[in-house]
Amino acid sequence: MGRLVHFEIHVEDMERAKKFYGEVFGWTYQDWSEFAGMPYFGAVTGDDSEPGVNGALMQRQGPAPEPTQPVNGFSCTMGVADFDTTEQKILDNGGTVALAKHALPGMAWQGYYKDTEGNIFGVHQPDEQAK
């Protein structure tokens, strides 16, 4: 079975991206640039005692996605305890709405955003009362 064990977010401005994900989701970083041969920062997304996966921010190797381009690859979704507070942090830190908050009836609230680098990511708050 091929379980997801790592993700990479391609970024144009490493410091801007580190600030965005650090401020919004509380991520911390480990500099792995020497191993990768390019700006590459391991992203610690939570405590190892909780389900989830760590990843990295890596230097984008080509042009940024066009503003109306569909997702080409994977979209990462972050689980949050408070959707509305997280959305405000996203907007306050330079992110934008890609697909507004909507109910997954009986399961959760879901929405999609663009980070400061033009990448789309999801936000998911479990809520059995969502409708």
Image: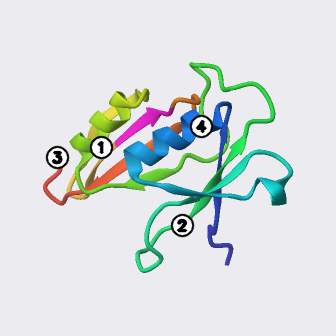
The disc labelled 2 sits on which kind of residue? Answer: Val
Sequence-wise, the earlier of marks 3 and 2 is 2
Which segment did they paint magenta? 111-115
Dot in front, 1 or 4: 4
Q: Work out whether 51 lies above or below 69.
A: below
Please name whichever residue, 4 or 1, is drawn nearer the observer in this view of the structure.
4
**Where residue 63 sits: x, y (%)?**
75, 25
What's the distance in space between the residues labelled 4 and 3, CA to CA?
38 Å
The disc labelled 1 sits on which kind of residue? Answer: Thr
What's the distance in space between the residues labelled 3 and 2, CA to CA?
29 Å
Is label 1 in a helix, a strand or a loop?
Answer: helix
Residue position marked by numbered label 3 in the rendering? 131
What's the distance in space between the residues labelled 1 and 4, CA to CA?
20 Å
Is label 3 in a helix, a strand or a loop?
Answer: loop
Q: Work out whether 68 lies above or below 2.
A: above
* Residue at the image point whose x is 64% and y is 38% from the top: 14
Classify residue 110 as left or right of residue 8.
left
What's the distance in space between the residues labelled 4 and 2, CA to CA?
22 Å
